[in-house]
Image (cartoon, rainbow, N blue to C red):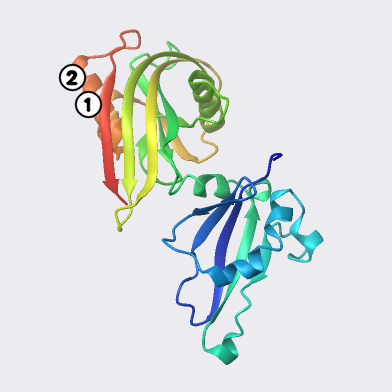
Amino acid sequence: MSKAFSLKVEVVEVKGKCPVYQKGDYFFIRNGYLLTLGNRESLCMHSFSCLLPYYVALARGIEPRELGLAGAGDHGAYVQCLDPCAYTGGGTVVFKIIPESQSSGTSRTGERAYPRWPLVGVGGLIFGDSKIDDSEILLIRRGVPPSKGMWSLPGGAVETGERLSSALEREVWEECGIRVRVGDVIAVFDAIYRDRCGRSKYHYVLIDFLAEYLGGQPRAASDVTELAWVSLEEALKLDLAEGTRKLLLFLKERKLSGDQPHVFYGKIEEMI
């Protein structure tokens, strides 16, 4: 099967009384055929009647407006469950189907929730050079879950076919606007974030590397809201993501500098 875009299906409106969905629910259709739960534990079979005629075309990149499913300027497709709720006492649900190719980053972030298997992420412990302060490290404030609003090391998810070092170089450039040279592995984490029902909402295997700052003007971009060069002592006063705090405490105890790698293994298990 040729490449197909993933689709995010969101509940945007519920008319009447639907026993299954509520506004804000979502799930995914990946690879053109694979149904994946999002924030739902179950799906309604009746709702598939409005989705089945269109999901293949949307996954193949056909514009929703070409199918009569969207107005001008809207890249999401709107469909509605066929239940005539005014007569049955049930509920009619309006869905918005968002092709990954037309999303503005929301789909990519959303698809990381409730994964079928753990995702691989990389982070960089980046020391400043003589133009800044070689005792300072670069931290970023996250703008998306699971550590939204908290400070952590720059980095992100590894893409298919991408080497770990290349992924880190790309993520640091996208998030911070700087170039780095990736060095040794410094830490490995099992990072599991569970929802109130005990399900694994986010599950990452995180690999952190030492990285050398090569150049570029630091600036917050992508899913980063703020960045700062700080000393280890200053960093530990910030609202840090759990894994970042554990690693920095380890570094403080070992008095690690930029050219003395040690590998730290940690576990992150949180309820969110």
Element type at mark 2: helix
Element type at mark 1: helix
Residue at 43% x, 49% y: name it.
Answer: 114
Left or right side of 209 for 8: right
Which label is found at residue 253? 2
Q: Position of residue 223 (x, y in %)?
A: 51, 41
Name the residue beneath numbered marker 1.
249
Q: Position of residue 260 (x, y in %)?
A: 30, 8
Q: Amino acid at mark 1?
A: Leu
Q: Amino acid at mark 2?
A: Glu
Above or below 190: residue 37: below
Above or below 39: residue 16: below
Q: Position of residue 1 (x, y in %)?
A: 69, 40
The image quadrant that residue 243 belongs to is top left
Return the residue nearer the eye: 133 or 24: 24
Above or below 246: residue 44: below
Q: CA distance from mark 1 to mark 2?
A: 6 Å
Return the residue nearer the eye: 26 or 81: 81
Residue furthest out toward the bottom: 87
Which label is found at residue 199? none
Q: Are marks 1 and 2 in contact (CB under 8 Å)?
A: yes
Residue at 63% x, 77% y: name it.
Answer: 82
The image quadrant that residue 83 belongs to is bottom right
Residue furthest out toward the right: 66
Residue at 39% x, 19% y: name it.
Answer: 209
Residue at 79% x, 62% y: name it.
Answer: 67
Residue furthest out toward the top: 259
Return the residue nearer the eye: 99 or 36: 36
The image quadrant that residue 13 belongs to is bottom right
* Few, some or many residues within 10 Å of mark 2 (<14, 14–19, 20+): few
* Few, some or many residues within 10 Å of mark 1 (<14, 14–19, 20+): some
Q: Position of residue 242 (x, y in %)?
A: 28, 37
